[in-house]
Image: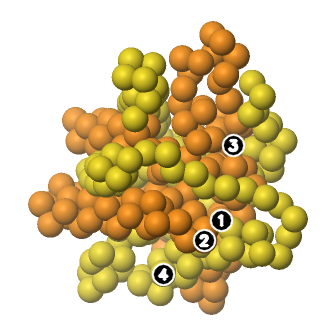
Amino acid sequence: MRTIVSLICGTIFGFGLYISGMIDPQKVLGFLDIWAIADGGWDPSLAFVMGGGLAVAIPIFQFAKNRTEAVCGGEMNLPTNRAITTKLIGGGVLFGIGWGLVGYCPGPALSALAFGHTDTIIFVVAMIVGMGSARVLGLNK
Amino acid sequence: MENFTPISALIGGGLIGLASGLYLLLNGRIAGISGILGGLLTPTKAGAAVFERLAFVIGLIAGPFILMNATEIEAQSVVTSSLPVIVVAGLLVGLGTTIGSGCTSGHGICGLSRFSLRSLVATLSFMIAGFVTVLVTRHLMGGM
């Protein structure tokens, strides 16, 4: 049952990335280019994706986080770490640089595999190598 | 602002929020894509939930595949960067999301929905780094 729920949630997430246009790195870069506000070339769409996402997710999260058990059974795996550390910020900055270079973050990069473009495949392979390297070096702790 | 698509952005965002909310409510897990994918790299660890993670990733790819083949809804995914930049960017995204414990979905959508200060700081970190990177590549170096 949990596996079927995962498949359905992943599919709905993929629908969202496709419909919102966030599956396209150029759309994402159009948002990150806030320096184009001056000449009218800025694309604020990503902010609306975040807004739409939070509008739906906040009520569900606020309801769900007080539960002691998931609907399909098992514990609620909510993060307990509240520490604001150099690693949190440093990791965020490294991720942001990579995100700004090509326009892919992990979700859209995986979803875009549906197009079968070589560039996307290379990005995803490099991303997985990066994730694996950080784990081998113990930087995920 | 000729590329601005507020309606499809809101609908797509709503679907992303719905998927994240349902995943927490039904399976008790955070729909952070970097965490879901990264967890597959250590499949023998306790609580790895390999099939659940794999099913989520398959859904992520199947969703767009279904829409592009079975509906009139069109989208594209265009990479304009050179090969070395693609590789470096992929490595940075993989390293950064692992070191910083999350990405746009885990910190951005799920973390902010929990009102987590930690996730807000992470989200601001990668957003600002993204803004500055695009400033450098598009405006100071004239495109990469």
Q: Kindly identify which residue carries mark 4.
A: B54
Q: Secondary structure at mark 3?
A: helix
Please rate how many residues cluster around mark 3, counting C-alpha atoms within 10 Å: few if below 14, some from 14 to 19, many from 20: many
Q: Which chain is orange?
A: A
Question: Which mark is nearer the camera, 2 or 3?
Answer: 2
Quadrant containing the N terminus of chain B in the rendered view: top right
The numbered dot on residue A49 is 3
Q: Secondary structure at mark 1?
A: helix
| Amino acid residing under circle 3 | Val
Work out how far the residue at label 4 is from the one at label 3, CA to CA, in angstroms.
25 Å
| Amino acid residing under circle 1 | Gly
* Residue B97 rendering spot, x and y as whole percentages: 35, 51
As drawn, A110 above or below B141 = below
Residue B20 in view, yes or no = yes
* Residue A57 rendering spot, x and y as whole percentages: 68, 51
Q: Which quadrant of the view contains residue A125? A: bottom left
Work out how far the residue at label 2 is from the one at label 4, CA to CA, in angstroms.
16 Å
Work out how far the residue at label 1 is from the one at label 4, CA to CA, in angstroms.
14 Å
Work out how far the residue at label 2 is from the one at label 3, CA to CA, in angstroms.
21 Å
Determine the chain carrying the residue at label 4: B
The numbered dot on residue A114 is 2
Q: Are marks 2 and 4 in contact (CB under 8 Å)?
A: no
Q: Kindly identify which residue carries mark 1.
A: A14
Q: Which chain is yellow?
A: B
Q: Secondary structure at mark 4?
A: helix
